[in-house]
Image (cartoon, helix red, strand yellow):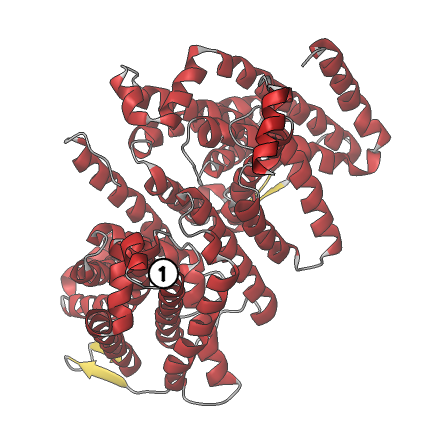
Amino acid sequence: MKYPLLFYGGALVVILVAPFLLSAIVAQLAFMWVMIVLALSWDLIGGQMGYNSFGNIIFFGIGMYACAVVQRDSGLGYFTGLAAGIGLSIVIAMVAAAILGSSILRLRGHYFSIATLGLGVAAGEFASSWDYIGAGSGMVTPLYPGEIEDRNLFYYFLFAAMAAITHFFLKWLYSTRFGLSINAIRDDEDKAEAMGLHTTRYKITAWCICAFFLSIVGAGVGNINGFIDPRESAFAGPTFGVWMILMAILGGTGSLWGPVMGAVVFHITQELFWTYLLGWQRVALGILIVVIVIFFPTGIMGWLNQRWPELFGEVIDTQKRQSAKGDHG
Amino acid sequence: MINNLMLLWDYPVTLVQLTLDGILLGAIFVLAAYGLALVWGVMNIINVAQGEFVMLGGFVTFYIYERLGLNPLWGIPASGVVMLFVGWTLYRIVIFRIVERDFFVSLLATFGLSILIQQFSNQVFGADIRTAEANLETLYLFDGLVAISWIKVVAFFAAITLGLILYFFMKKSKLGQAIRATAQNPRAAGILGIDTDRIYASTFAINAAICGIGGSLIAMTLIIHPFIGLSHTIRSFMIVVVAGLGNMLGVIFAGLGLGELEIYSGFILGAEYQNGVIFIALVVILVWRNFRLGRKRLYLK
């Protein structure tokens, strides 16, 4: 990017102005930031490290429930309760990621994918039979002290800040040795290990980072919805759980901007489906998943990369390209 | 939980009841698991929509019972035939595009397919819990302390018969031999004049038919609704992982074992945890098998 300051400044202005210009859809815009965080955090594991997890949603759900329990039982005010709740959800989610990761991250390939899929569903099943967190009837989060518009605006800025933090943190992370190490794990884990990388440590750390962002967003989503359902919102494998994968793939895995673009495009499509396809929106989503996965496995970034490689810093010899075209033509 | 254990201690005859239930249940799971192993072994695809085929087969039987007023036993062949066509069609539309692709593409594509079928059924059939009553009698053993409904026994023997038919089909028939050849080496099979694309289509269709029959038996002995799919996929996957790919006898024993696990955990922990236990068992089994391999510096492949 030639003018990063100009770009980020422009983005900041758009973020600050958008909720006031489009005041009717602030909640939907807030969810767009949630989607961006979900896609970015999935891409850390799936795209950069090559571990295609179907179960990252459990950290989202853990965050949601932990925060709601603190808000219910601590007796603090709304904002202090929320802050304490988010703090606790981060701790629980990261501990869970470390414990689960130390055994599950040793699995590879489709065994890892299916194990995480089972884990996500099992979490939903147990949450819906545990009385302390409301079992199958779910939990109600405390009421926001103020108008609904204010609530939406508050969470809009919270999620926007989270998306920005996630983006910049990952940008920094991918530029460090850690980023190179997880890329090495994706490319060839055995060789990475042979080169002396403690692969398991890197994998667990990456999953913990993922859990960190997901739990904060989960806590916020529980509050903006005002209601937690164990299977439909907290451990929603067939919706948020798959969407985060789909958004990363749609945008292009293994890049920083791919998941962001994928999340924006997917979120708009999804909102349109919900508005115009009464009842059939989930069927349409299923078709969308199949079509995206089969026909666009490299995503938007992959397509751009193929179309304009110059944008990605690849030096192209124009003469060579001409002659290559001539050969094939 | 303790009360249930005490009950088992006081009335050991309950053990007989539970064990028989487990065997009869497990035999039905074996069918879908065998289909999964077939597709996995031949096409190298893990079909996440497996459970949805089971569910569709169940609905075929249910409608034969409800709309046509026939005995649901007629649903067994009908589900098989209908699902054969469904499987063939799905292969021709979607699946042939993901054969020989990266495993993640096939996993996610079939996952999308499973959501599609599940939500479609939810719209078309409705989310109610259904069951097809075959109106058979109940068999009483031990002075009526152990009750086994005949339909479960019939389903058990239907599953065994289908298993035997499949076994001889794969061993003796031309198509079965071609399928096995393709599984061993698709390139060599192609050179020897086997149309691998057609073999893949048949394999997938046969898999769907097996699942359909399994679903038909489930509709008669248990319940069906549009969202049972994923738990059946997970069951099949678990059975295949425990047995090891390409081990037919292992699939049978693993299936029966899973049936026992489910019945006993459902009895001891309570029915609401039964589903959760299946998924946890999957994770535990995978981790445990991988851990044992890990000591030799290997991992599950």
Residue A300 location, x and y as percent? Answer: 62, 35
Q: Is residue B95 above or below residue B107?
A: below
Is residue B90 or residue B243 the one in the foreground?
A: B90
Residue B33 location, x and y as percent? Answer: 30, 61
Residue B30 location, x and y as percent? Answer: 27, 65
In the picture, residue A168 is in which quadrant?
top right
Residue lying furthest right: A21
Is residue A269 or residue B274 the one in the foreground?
A: A269
User: What residue is rendered at 25% in x and 62% in y?
Assistant: B180
Q: Is residue A138 above or below residue A92?
A: below
Q: Which residue is mark 1?
A: B196
Q: Is residue A202 left or right of residue B65?
A: left
- Image quarter where the C terminus of chain B lies is top left
In the picture, residue A277 is in which quadrant?
bottom right
Question: Can residue A139 be seen by looking at this rendering?
Answer: yes
Question: Can residue B269 be seen by looking at this rendering?
Answer: no
User: What residue is rendered at 35% in x and 38% in y?
Assistant: A109
Specify the subunit that label 1 lies on. B
Q: Is residue B42 left or right of residue B102?
A: left
Q: How many marks are shown on the rendered structure?
A: 1
Q: Amino acid at mark 1?
A: Thr
Q: Is residue B228 left or right of residue B144?
A: right
Q: Is residue B222 above or below residue B283?
A: below
Is residue B297 or residue A208 the one in the foreground?
A: B297
In the picture, residue A228 is in which quadrant?
top right
Residue B278 location, x and y as percent? Answer: 32, 52
Dot 1 falls on a residue whose secondary structure is helix
User: What residue is rendered at 35% in x and 30% in y?
Assistant: A101
